[in-house]
Image (spheres, helix red, strand yellow):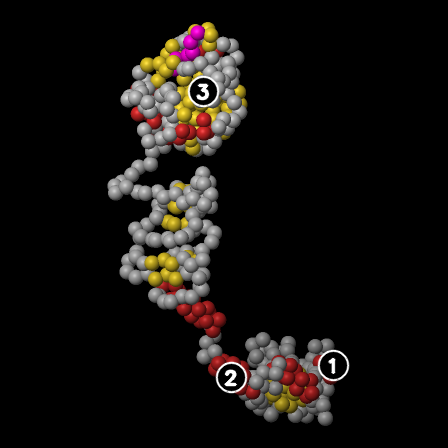
Amino acid sequence: MTDYLFRPSGLQPGTTYRVDTGASNGTAAAITRVDPKTPIDGSKLKADAAGAVPEFVGTAATLYLRPLDYLGTPGTAVSSTGSAFPVATASTGVSQSDLTAAVAATLGGAPDWMNTLAEISTSINDDPAFAATVTAAIASAVAAERTTAATMTNKTIDTAGPNTLKVKGMTVDATGSNTGTWLFPSISGTINLVGNSNTQTITSKSLDTSNRIIDSSDSTKKVAFALSGITTGTTRTITVPNGDVTLTSAAATVAGLHGLKAVSLDPYTATGNGAITLGRIYFARVRVDDAATITGVIYHVALAASGATSGQNFVGLYDTSGNLLGVSADQTTNFGSTGERKAALTTPYAAAAGYYLIAILSNASTSGVGIARGNSNGSSPFAHNLNVTGVNSRFSSFTTGSQTSLPSTISTGSIDGVTSLPLLLGLY
């Protein structure tokens, strides 16, 4: 025997119907409700407010609904065209095997203890807002982890927390307020040290030009370390005195006060003229505090040369290894009269911070040029070279032969600090 499922609709709301086997024979059909929770009264069903009756199962392919009057007497059969109206046909019904397959597909292999709606409801604590409840619980747990003191291993505190801290291979042991020890094992890359009220010690860590010390209130204010000028394999120590120190820019030095890149002595101390020995190259050792482009040499002629030899008078710039870095045009005309002179280098030189030698050479038929100079106290070796000798002398000369031009290289071993003049020479 085949069973058929019926889903009647389009009926009179609130009206009670009897399921018959025929359109007019008044024989009640044997039916079974699909939902056993609501029993049926024999073959009678009552349409709901939407004009539908509960689903039911019958053994015939076609059944009919006959409305009953208030006394329970069968009324006229439902009809839409003037003839008996079929509620369902075999084409719209399904067999018991179809129902069994549909139920199995719905369960999808769920275990016996979780294959009914009642069991699922119990498992979520009969909570209609279960998803929201779980989400809130997770958020609460995450917030507690961010704010509660705990030991964290290889975890990341992201920007949603009160601070941003990447923790990996790092031990943070902090107690009290704004105190603690930070241990940085095997750190490479960029370390940002943000100023605050704490004291932090960093031992044997590299702080190169890619790292910065950042102001605590304005992160755009930074200090970088540039150590490229240190000799390879050498460690230089910066010793802080027992007192507050303010770093002063080169502009506040004597050279800076005169708008120069370097100067051999304070022009205020110049007391006379240094009569240059003809054909001897004289040097003044100066320091360029900041990397700069050297345009030329400045000097002051205190005594004009007599019979200056054309093409044999020059000023120039050497490094402390004896290499000529730049030379002026012939200074015969400039040496022939007194006053301040600026001699441009034929090619400007891009100088790194460090020490350099300013050179001057004079040749004449009678007497060489006299350059403004400082005082030479004492006897040779003079006080102006106190504690320094040779190429390290503050003032010196090249003692080899008689020169008519500035050589491209000189032997630093031939630089003599004994035969010297404290000449006022500068770089601009």
Picture quarter with the C terminus: top left
Residue 410's place in the image compared with 25, above or below, is above
Amino acid type, mark 1: Ser
Q: Where is residue 188 in the image (x, y as percent from the top left)?
A: 47, 54
Amino acid type, mark 3: Ile
Q: Where is residue 163 in the image (x, y as percent from the top left)?
A: 39, 56
* Front tag of 2 and 3: 3
Say which residue label 1 marks.
Answer: 91
Main secondary structure of the magenta stretch: strand
| Res 96 quadrant in image | bottom right
Amino acid type, mark 2: Glu
Asked if residue 24 shows in the view, the reply is: no
Q: Which residue is drawn at 72% across and 93% down?
A: 1
* Front tag of 1 and 2: 2
Earlier-in-chain disc, 1 versus 3: 1
Report the span colored magenta. 366-371
| Res 24 quadrant in image | bottom right
Q: Please name whichever residue, 279 or 334, is drawn nearer the observer in this view of the structure.
A: 279
Say which residue label 3 marks.
Answer: 281
Q: What element carries label 3?
A: strand
Say which residue label 2 marks.
Answer: 119
Q: Is mark 2 on a helix, strand or loop?
A: helix
Residue 48's place in the image compared with 335, above or below, is below
